[in-house]
Image (cartoon, helix red, strand yellow):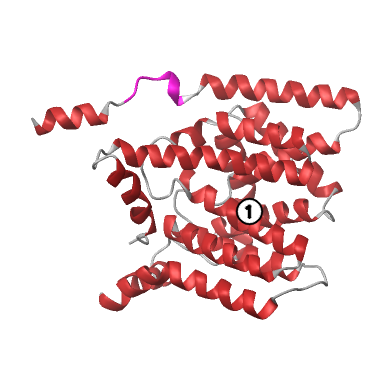
């Protein structure tokens, strides 16, 4: 079972709107909009206003992000909490104040309760915490409060396991040790990373599965990684991307779109970062044309173009 935090969140709009199920979908839609805002704010903080606008715009029109922002489902808010965690890490690096671990602890625990693959954010956070400035403030209280916040948010799930003979712990242990769902073969796993990167992440989320755009964007996103890796934002995005893909490669079954919820903001922020890197006018025109082509292919697959399911009306008719 996933943690109950999503249902606690859902209870608020459901209470306000008298148990109307559309309220829960509305909550996810609101979180989806806030996720776009977070993408913009991080892009602006790291690479400038234009970069933030490009990142947020492309994220907002991605068909897959729209699909997972217009219905009520546990994994849908995962990108929001992943971005909150990265923002907390950025503030720790920038200020040296470890009290930001409170935000990080909350975001990691919340993301983990949305979908278990968000556990990959923990080693990402650990790596980025090691790479910090010499100036450190509130290390001990920040660490203690961060860990306590994480445990507090996770406590309902831990209590559930204590009351139900460690059901989740046994299920996770069985997943890791039995069957073929998880495979620890580094060489085999590494060979899966290009496909996870180009098809599952870039193709599905960014380029509307257009083959030529997928190949182009997959290569272009390596440019800031190669030339600006010493910059903390690019380093953070690189660690987020590489560790995320490596973690996913251990899973041997089908990788669905929502499995990448903890990772999907990365390509949009990397693409936006190029606006801050490019100085040659002709290249800026090229980036503008790329955004135009991405707009065309994404809007052609926009799920809002298709008739809705009318699930509420259908449910009411079935009930009658």
Among the 4 quarters of the image, the one containing residue 162:
bottom left
Q: Residue at x 34, y 49 (%)?
A: 12
**Residue 81 image offset from top left, x and y in percent:** 53, 53
Horizontally, residue 83 falls left or right of residue 182, namely right
Vertical position of residue 287 compared to residue 263: above or below: above
Q: Residue at x 8, y 30 (%)?
A: 320
Horizontally, residue 192 falls left or right of residue 110, namely right
Q: Residue at x 10, y 33 (%)?
A: 319
| Residue 7 visible in rendering | yes
**Residue 104 image offset from top left, x and y in percent:** 59, 63
Horizontally, residue 189 falls left or right of residue 7, namely right
Give the labeled residue for mark 1: 191
From the viewer's side, name the closer residue of 157 and 116: 157
Vertical position of residue 212 compared to residue 113: above or below: above
Q: Residue at x 51, y 30 (%)?
A: 63
Question: From which residue to which does the magenta span run?
Answer: 303-308
Residue that lies at the very extreme toward the bottom in this rendered image: 140
From the viewer's side, name the closer residue of 156 and 197: 156
Residue that lies at the very extreme toward the left in this rendered image: 320
**Residue 276 image offset from top left, x and y in percent:** 82, 37
């Amino acid at each position: 079972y996933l943690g109950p935090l999503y249902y606690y969140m859902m209870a608020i709009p459901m209470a306000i709107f008298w148990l109307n199920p559309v309220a829960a979908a509305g909550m996810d839609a609101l979180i989806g909009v806030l996720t776009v805002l977070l993408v913009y704010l991080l892009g602006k903080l790291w690479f400038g206003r234009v970069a933030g606008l490009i990142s947020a715009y492309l994220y907002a029109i991605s068909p897959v992000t729209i699909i997972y922002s217009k219905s009520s489902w546990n994994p849908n808010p995962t990108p929001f909490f992943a971005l909150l965690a990265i923002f907390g890490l950025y503030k720790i690096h920038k200020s040296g104040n470890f009290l930001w671990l409170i935000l990080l602890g909350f975001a990691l625990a919340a993301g983990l309760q949305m979908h278990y693959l968000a556990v990959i954010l923990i080693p990402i956070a650990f790596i980025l915490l090691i790479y910090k400035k010499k100036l450190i403030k509130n290390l001990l209280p920040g660490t203690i409060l961060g860990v306590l916040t994480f445990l507090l948010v996770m406590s309902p799930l831990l209590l559930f396991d204590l009351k139900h003979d460690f059901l989740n712990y046994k299920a996770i242990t069985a997943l890791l040790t039995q069957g073929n769902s998880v495979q620890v073969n580094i060489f085999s796993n590494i060979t899966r990373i290009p496909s996870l990167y180009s098809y599952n992440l870039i193709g599905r989320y960014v380029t509307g599965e257009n083959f030529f755009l997928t190949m182009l964007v997959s290569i272009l996103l390596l440019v800031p990684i190669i030339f600006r890796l010493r910059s903390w934002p690019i380093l953070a995005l690189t660690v987020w991307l590489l560790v995320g893909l490596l973690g996913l490669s251990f899973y041997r079954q089908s990788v669905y779109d929502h499995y990448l919820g903890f990772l999907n903001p990365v390509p949009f922020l990397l693409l936006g970062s190029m606006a801050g890197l490019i100085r040659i006018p002709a290249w800026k025109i090229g980036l503008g044309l790329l955004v135009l082509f991405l707009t065309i292919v994404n809007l052609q697959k926009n799920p809002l173009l298709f008739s809705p399911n009318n699930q509420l009306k259908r449910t009411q008719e079935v009930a009658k």
